[in-house]
């Protein structure tokens, strides 16, 4: 191992926490800087009286990824957080009154599909096989590695894998191969939103999400998903990471193509031998690094990336237990039109698909006096000028009205609520135009040619988070944190 070095990690989201734990457990001294007063980034809890909500990731897949961070640092994951598998996890409800559940039990799933369309049920096993194959390819070739330059793409196995993961077909076309019922296709197409993209544009590669949910399973963290962030923070502290919350980094100092330290908003300089940028690189690289030292990520080069979807979120405390599943989706009649609104016209859908996570269905102690409804509608990212294209109060009313039409009449039972808009997400986390998952995967170039994990200009600066490889979503950013830390360790050992 190389001599103990001081590493600055900018941002205490899941990617930053994973990188910090890795670096510290490999003998380096980490200084973790987080501008907000809590770690976990987008994953944090919100309290409204006796009601508690997980903001950020509600659907947890790949639990081994979170556990590995601790295990590989010599800690026992069970001392920090435990997962509960939700076998029949999501109810999909349609405007014609029909519904079916997603389940990681294949027999139950076949029954559910057969209730809507026996022909689609027959295609299910071959669908499962195909998505599992896609996942294996991605796991072998993309998920466990960093990308530092174009040369990393120039290997024959990777080129073969790139062609095998169906980059030229859309996710929607992939699903139509296996299923014939429009409602079933619509429910599977929703997986594109897990990477903040449109199923009609994003490559079929992302059908692998179906493997994660339906073969592997959907999980809930006992006590709330925020326990993941709390557990990683506790482990980081135990290992010796210095965590400075409420501390915003305003500048990265460089010399001879290397980072030499970071400067806080209060003008405090911290010397560093290397750095991991966990804050969204599309906002933080331009604001922390002088453009002259980063020709590889010039402002012009960064203009080619487009943001993932944002969200309009309402956390609503009600004095009632509604007939809802832990994960419940109310679909609309025109799914394609919804994505056209978001990505082509940058407008909020007039009849949006509404997702509700009610963790109190699995864990009533999260809100003992009624349901804790986390209501999420996909929203366009902010415009290039940073503007939001909807009136908050009017859109809240529209969502309540739509839910009443679906039989969920919230207003008579409303205890309190908190709304979070794309503008709030941009301001609070410095997320690129309020995106949830960094860069969208609507174009092949954005999927496979994201900004590299290593700066092309500053050899000891690495990136971790949704805007770099392997992409957005909580397990992916953890992987990028681990990968970035490993690469930085190798770099420091040179
Ligand atoms: C509403 C919502 C729902 C979601 N649902 C899911 C889901 O169901 N499943 C799933 O897997 N994922 C989901 N996600 C996505 C998931 O939350 C993110 O992919 C993940 O949490 C991002 O982690 P990160 O570490 O990359 O970034 P972040 O969580 O954004 O962390 C980056 C941190 O850097 C800090 N920072 C930025 N700049 C600076 C600076 N200059 N100085 C100091 N600190 C700085 C920010 O304050 C932030 O805390 C959802 C996200 C949202 C918002």
Image (cartoon, rainbow, N blue to C red):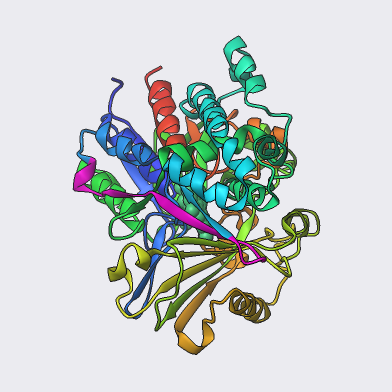
Q: Image quadrant for the C terminus? A: top left
In this view, the residue in front, 56 or 260, is 56
Residue 419's place in the image compared with 319, above or below, is above
Residue 92: percent from left, percent from top: 56, 58
Which residue occupies 60% across, 73% down? 406
Total numbered labels = 0
Q: Which residues are magenta?
A: 77-98
In this view, the residue in front, 323 or 305, is 323
Q: Image quadrant for the N terminus? A: top left
- Would you say 192 lies left or right of 13 here? right
Residue 437: percent from left, percent from top: 57, 49
Q: Is residue 83 magenta?
A: yes
Which of the 4 quarters of the picture holds residue 76? top left
Which of the 4 quarters of the picture holds residue 41? bottom left
Residue sticking out furthest to the right:
345
Residue 33's place in the image compared with 330, above or below, is above
Residue 351 seen in this snapshot: yes
Residue 144: percent from left, percent from top: 46, 27
Q: Is residue 109 magenta?
A: no
- Would you say 159 lies left or right of 223 here? right
In this view, the residue in front, 41 or 288, is 41
Residue 477 seen in this snapshot: no
Residue 233's place in the image compared with 121, above or below, is below
Residue sticking out furthest to the bottom:
412
Residue 241: percent from left, percent from top: 28, 44
In this view, the residue in front, 492 or 137, is 137
């Amino acid at each position: 191992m190389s001599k103990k070095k001081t590493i600055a990690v900018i941002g205490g989201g899941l990617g930053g926490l994973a990188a910090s734990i890795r670096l510290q457990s490999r003998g380096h001294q980490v200084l973790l800087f987080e501008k907000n007063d809590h770690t976990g980034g987008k994953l944090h809890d919100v309290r409204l009286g006796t009601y508690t909500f997980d903001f950020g990731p509600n659907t947890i897949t790949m639990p081994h990824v979170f556990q590995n961070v601790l295990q590989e640092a010599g800690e026992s994951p069970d001392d920090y957080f435990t997962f509960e598998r939700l076998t029949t996890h999501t109810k999909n409800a349609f405007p014609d009154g029909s519904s079916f559940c997603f389940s990681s039990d294949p027999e139950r799933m076949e029954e559910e599909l057969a209730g809507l369309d026996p022909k689609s049920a027959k295609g299910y096993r071959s669908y499962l096989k195909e998505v599992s194959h896609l996942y294996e390819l991605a796991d072998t070739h993309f998920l466990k590695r960093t990308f530092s330059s174009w040369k990393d793409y120039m290997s024959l196995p990777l080129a073969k894998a790139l062609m095998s993961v169906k980059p030229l077909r859309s996710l929607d076309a992939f699903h139509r191969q296996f299923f014939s019922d429009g409602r079933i296709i619509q429910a599977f197409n929703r997986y594109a939103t897990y990477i903040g993209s449109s199923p009609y544009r994003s490559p079929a590669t992302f059908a692998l999400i179906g493997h994660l949910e339906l073969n592997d399973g959907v999980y809930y963290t006992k006590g709330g998903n925020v326990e993941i962030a709390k557990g990683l923070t506790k482990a980081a502290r135990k290992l010796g990471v210095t965590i400075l919350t409420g501390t915003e980094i305003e500048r990265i100092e460089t010399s001879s193509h290397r980072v030499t330290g970071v400067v806080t908003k209060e003008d405090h300089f911290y010397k560093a031998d290397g750095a991991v940028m966990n804050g969204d690189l599309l906002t933080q690289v331009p604001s922390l690094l002088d453009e002259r030292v980063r020709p590889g990520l010039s402002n012009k080069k960064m203009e080619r990336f487009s943001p993932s979807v944002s969200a309009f979120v309402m956390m609503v405390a009600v004095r009632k237990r509604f007939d809802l599943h832990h994960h419940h989706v109310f679909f609309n009649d025109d799914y394609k039109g919804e994505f056209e609104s978001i990505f082509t016209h940058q407008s909020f859908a007039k009849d949006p698909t509404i997702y509700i996570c009610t963790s109190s269905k699995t864990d009533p102690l999260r809100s003992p006096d009624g349901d804790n409804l986390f209501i999420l509608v996909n929203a366009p990212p902010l415009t290039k000028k940073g503007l939001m294209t909807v009136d908050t109060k009017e859109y809240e009313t529209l969502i309540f009205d739509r839910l009443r039409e679906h039989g969920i009449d919230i207003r008579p039972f409303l205890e309190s609520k908190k709304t979070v808009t794309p503008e709030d997400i941009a301001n609070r986390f410095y997320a690129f135009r309020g995106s949830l998952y960094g860069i969208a995967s609507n174009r092949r170039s954005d999927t496979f040619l994201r900004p590299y994990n290593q700066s092309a200009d500053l050899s000891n600066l690495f990136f971790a988070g949704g805007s770099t490889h392997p992409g957005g979503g909580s397990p992916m950013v953890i992987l990028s944190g681990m990968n970035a830390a490993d690469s930085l360790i190798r770099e420091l050992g040179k």
